[in-house]
Image (cartoon, coloured by chain):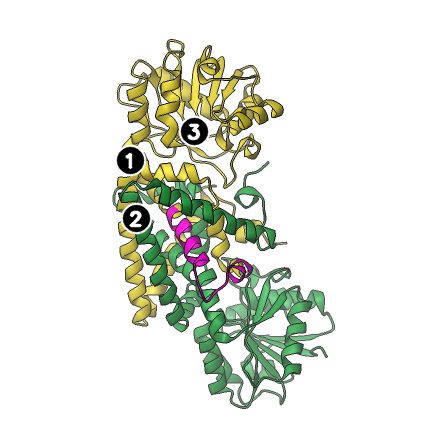
Chain colours: A green, B yellow
């Protein structure tokens, strides 16, 4: 059974992409929305993203059978608390946060009576705001549901069907395991990209203009990641601290190992690793999680 | 004054791209080529990349007025030595290596009589071999020349004009400074990408299949870089050791600083850096060194 009315709390990149995707895939579904930023609410109304932009979160969710919180993970508890007195009985509350155990715990705490099923669509771009969204953002991407052990099978299935209708492939996972997997596939890469872009901009003997000019050598791929929403990413690191620090520790050890190989002119160690990492890339392209064109199709042709 | 006959020693991604670009931009120029791998020579002949595929490096350069060594930087000395007795008087010998001080020194040593002007086109993809090349690879990219202090102005200008004709923007730089700039814009990013892809493939609690499935969260951008030619990159790290280790040291310090901020729940430090790094991305897009489409245009649409 599908949903009749979906409420989106937060109308940035992800919220506005869900709105657009619902319009295309389920035009019969009612859409309401709210954002704590008045300018975003106004822009969402101009764009006609939802049927009704509410002035407060309670109004947005009053007749919803699915509420999706599309706010930074550090703002989930506050966003959830604001709904507590307005949620229709039986409505499913979900979210799109990139860390799951902490979000699940805080939503449980502020919405003890509600049906909460956390979710994480593994999709996004470096752009933010209601104008950055697009309907195909979730096409062919994974959406990971992390229902609690006591979640009702029917509820989980309804949410799963919703994401499938938006083009996503759905997976279920324990929240803790999710946080570990995403720490390596997403959070650590972002932390490293932010770091190296910061390092490059702090050099004395190399100017920022030189860094920008010669970025095609590899650096520019890091800058795209390091242009992601600062609030969102601050919150992710603070709410998935344990797994991120664990992965960071391993990364640092591996980096020291390569550093030593360079210092000792040990070319074989370098060559062996560099050969091994090529295989992983092939797996990602083979499984449709990236395009095969060289350089992401930037220059070929 | 342009060149009449260009010889390419090494017919992989870069050598074959130069061949294709010369064909398009300067169809009147004679092209000869050699590769130490017989299979590559055969494939280059099939593709008709050059007018004449020679069986040995001496034959390739016999009537050239420009010789470009397109081999891994660790193979430059050997490639140069093989030409020593066959180079026409006055021919310019250049290269495309990603580290310059070491290459310049080794070419000087094996070709003491020759006119050597090292060069580095900052362009490439993660693919290798003669089939991977394409004529537009250098379009709008920088090519850095690192002539020695005693290089003749006319010779440097001729080589500069050659690269401009292939669509590149030419810059001149001291070899040592080049190596420092590229250490941060290219070598360190590659080292880090190789490391994190290796780290991810060594985990016990996260499977390789999970890493591949959820790579869209950031990881996949690193895997593209970490799919680059292993021989080429081994040689770069060994020949630009000092600058790479210097940059790595700074990066590690900065990473420890962020690690500490996460451990101490210091969100302000994270937020400040993440805001600063966005500006660098804007500079790269503004200067045409990358496309502005979100996610490199992968999903938008």
Q: Nearer the viewer, residue A96 or B204?
A: B204
* Secondary structure under the numbered disc 1 in the rendered image: helix
Is residue B138 in sight in this rendering? no
Label disc, if present, on residue B246 of the rendered structure: none
The range drawn in magenta is B191-213
**Residue drawn at point x = 28 percent, y = 26 percent:** B105
Instruction: Of the two numbered discs 1 and 3 on the same chain, state the one appearing first in sequence.
Output: 3
Q: Quadrant of the C terminus of chain A?
A: top right
Confirm or deny contact between disc 1 and disc 3 (CB under 8 A): no
According to the picture, the residue beneath numbered tag 1 turns out to be B177
For the residue carrying disc 3, how many other residues have a C-alpha within 10 Å: few (<14), some (14-19), or many (20+)? many
* Secondary structure under the numbered disc 2 in the rendered image: helix
According to the picture, the residue beneath numbered tag 3 turns out to be B71
Is A133 magenta? The answer is no
**Residue drawn at point x = 73 percent, y = 69 percent:** A27
User: Circle 2 marks a residue in which chain?
Assistant: A
Q: Are marks 2 and 1 on the same chain?
A: no
Residue furthest right as drawn: A28
Q: Is residue B173 left or right of residue A186?
A: left
Residue A265: % across, % down: 29, 40
Is residue A205 in sight in this rendering? yes
* Secondary structure under the numbered disc 3 in the rendered image: loop
Question: Compared with residue B283, is residue A159 higher up or lower down, i.e. above or below?
Answer: below
Confirm or deny contact between disc 3 and disc 2 (CB under 8 A): no
For the residue carrying disc 1, how many other residues have a C-alpha within 10 Å: few (<14), some (14-19), or many (20+)? some
According to the picture, the residue beneath numbered tag 2 turns out to be A259
Residue B135: % across, % down: 56, 30
Q: CA distance from mark 1 to mark 3?
A: 22 Å
């Amino acid at each position: 059974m599908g949903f009749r009315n979906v409420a989106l709390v937060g109308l940035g990149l992800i919220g506005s992409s869900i709105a657009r995707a619902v319009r295309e895939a389920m035009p019969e579904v009612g859409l309401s929305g709210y954002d704590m930023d008045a300018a975003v609410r106004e822009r969402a109304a101009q764009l006609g993203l939802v049927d009704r932009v509410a002035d407060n979160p309670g109004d947005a969710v009053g007749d919803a059978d699915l509420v999706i919180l599309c706010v930074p993970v550090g703002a989930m508890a506050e966003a959830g608390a604001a709904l507590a007195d307005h949620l229709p009985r039986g409505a499913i509350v979900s979210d799109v946060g990139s860390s799951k155990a902490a979000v699940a715990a805080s939503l449980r705490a502020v919405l003890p009576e509600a049906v909460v099923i956390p979710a994480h669509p593994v999709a996004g771009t470096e752009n933010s705001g209601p104008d950055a969204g697009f309907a195909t953002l979730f096409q062919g991407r994974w959406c990971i549901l992390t229902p609690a052990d006591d979640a009702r099978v029917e509820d989980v299935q309804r949410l799963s069907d919703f994401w499938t209708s938006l083009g996503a492939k759905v997976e279920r996972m324990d929240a803790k395991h999710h946080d570990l997997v995403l720490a390596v596939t997403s959070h650590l890469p972002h932390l490293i990209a932010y770091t190296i872009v910061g390092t490059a901009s702090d050099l004395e003997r190399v100017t920022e203009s030189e860094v920008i000019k010669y970025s095609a050598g590899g650096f520019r791929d890091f800058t795209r990641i390091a242009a992601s929403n600062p609030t969102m990413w601050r919150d992710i690191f603070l709410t998935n601290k344990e797994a991120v620090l664990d992965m960071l520790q391993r990364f640092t050890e591996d980096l020291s190992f390569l550093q030593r190989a360079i210092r000792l002119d040990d070319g074989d160690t370098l060559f062996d690793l560099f050969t091994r990492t090529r295989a992983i890339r092939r797996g990602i392209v083979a499984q449709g999680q990236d395009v095969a064109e060289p350089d992401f199709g930037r220059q070929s042709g």
